Amino acid sequence: MDVIFELIKDFFTGMTNYGYMYINGLTAIIAAFVPLTTIIFAQYYDKNAENANESLWRIKDKLAKTDFDLFEIQSIFKKMVYVGGNSAFFNFAITMFSIICGFLILLWSIAGISYVSGMELKLSNTDTITVISATSIFIVLLVALPIMFFVIKKRVPIKIKNKGCPLENYNKVFEIRDTEGYNKYYNQIQNIQLTIPLVTTNIKLNLNQAIPISDYHILYNLKVDTRTYIIIKLNISRGMTSSEYEISRTLYKWWNKEVIVNPQSILNDFNNLDESSSMVYMKGFKKKLQPVSCQVKMDYTTEQVKTSLSRFIIHSLDGENSLLMKSRGSMLILCRDNKKYTYKLKLKNK
């Protein structure tokens, strides 16, 4: 125990004047950058927060009117997502600045203790109080600056990631708590549509949404008849208004030695979907978000089938749908005559 104490004592009292001079010079350079960096970051992020708040107020003001302009609300929300996405650099800068401040606090704490406890210096009481006070003020400043940045960061009304607006935050913006909110803000504003081209050499799926929402699962359970149904499960981890998926490879156990259905043949099933018995399920990545389901509206042409969301209901998921929601990756599953054929879906426009 005495050996450890002596080592600690030697560590704190072992700093020479060369060490103090180096720390003083380096700190002077850092101190010159701190005010400039603080002003630039604070003004930049404060402007972002102001623009985001203004966009949110405009959206709520227009939604209060019965005859709101749908396209204008979508444009304002996209602007808010863009402004929030620009804060990614600011968040990185805050993290780096906090780490640097943490190292400076540690460094100056060691230097201050070493300076005061140095036996050869024989400091007076006034010198000791002055050194401790100056070091403490400098450390408090280094602690306060990152805290100030994090306070400014919270001024942004809704958390927007550089990859889009998470589903949870979208619900917060429009205060969606019940089926009425889902029916209004998802059917009218978000307008999620899945388009399946029928004239193609390979299965392609196009998911379109008016606003770049991210961090959610969407599962289409499309009925063909009593013996056949198709499940399309997509993980939306990036906020894009248009996403294109295609079959990447077939997943199956090689020892089954079953004939895997040609993906091309599934297109025939898409031509015969039963709208009345098909459903769509949605759930955010976070567990606390309640899953929702809705009926499907289908529009056919000779070249494609387009599905859109209809009437929402809120309920818990169970059975196969619950397991699929928890699974990773996007996939298409063909269930025919009690056999399942699973295909991995690959996002093309990353």
Image (cartoon, rainbow, N blue to C red):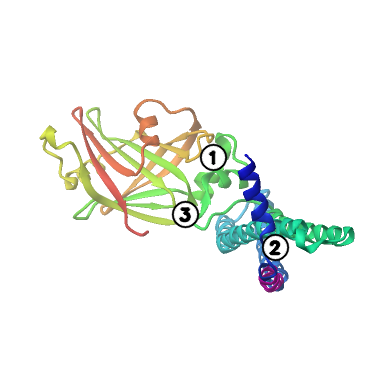
**Camera-side residue of 124 and 303:** 124
Residue 46, which numbered label? Answer: 2
Q: Nearer the viewer, residue 12 or 312?
A: 12
Q: Is residue 53 magenta?
A: no
Check disc 2 and report its element: helix, strand or loop. Answer: helix
Residue 303 percent coordinates (x, y): 26, 54
- Viewer-nearest of labels 3 and 1? 3
Q: Is residue 141 left or right of residue 158?
A: right
Q: Earlier in the sequence, mark 3 or mark 2?
A: 2
Which type of secondary structure does the marked residue at label 3 adopt?
loop
Pointer 2 local density, CA inside 10 Å: few below 14, some 14–19, many at least 20: some
If you read the primary sequence from the N terminus, does the residue marked by circle 2 or circle 1 appear first? 2
Please report contact status of discs 3 and 1: CB closer than 8 Å, yes or no: no
**Is residue 23 inside the magenta stretch?**
yes
> In terms of secondary structure, where does tag 1 sit?
helix
Which residue carries the number 1 mark?
A: 182
Asked which quadrant contains residue 24, the reply is bottom right
Residue 277 point in image, percent of width and height: 35, 31
Question: Which residue extends farthest right?
Answer: 126
Location of the N terminus (image quadrant): top right
For image coordinates 65% across by 45% down, the residue present is 5
Q: Earlier in the sequence, mark 3 or mark 1?
A: 1
Which span is picked out in magenta? Answer: 20-31
Q: Amino acid at mark 3?
A: Gly
Question: Which residue is labeled 3 in the image?
Answer: 239
Judge whether 249 appears above or below 27 on screen.
above
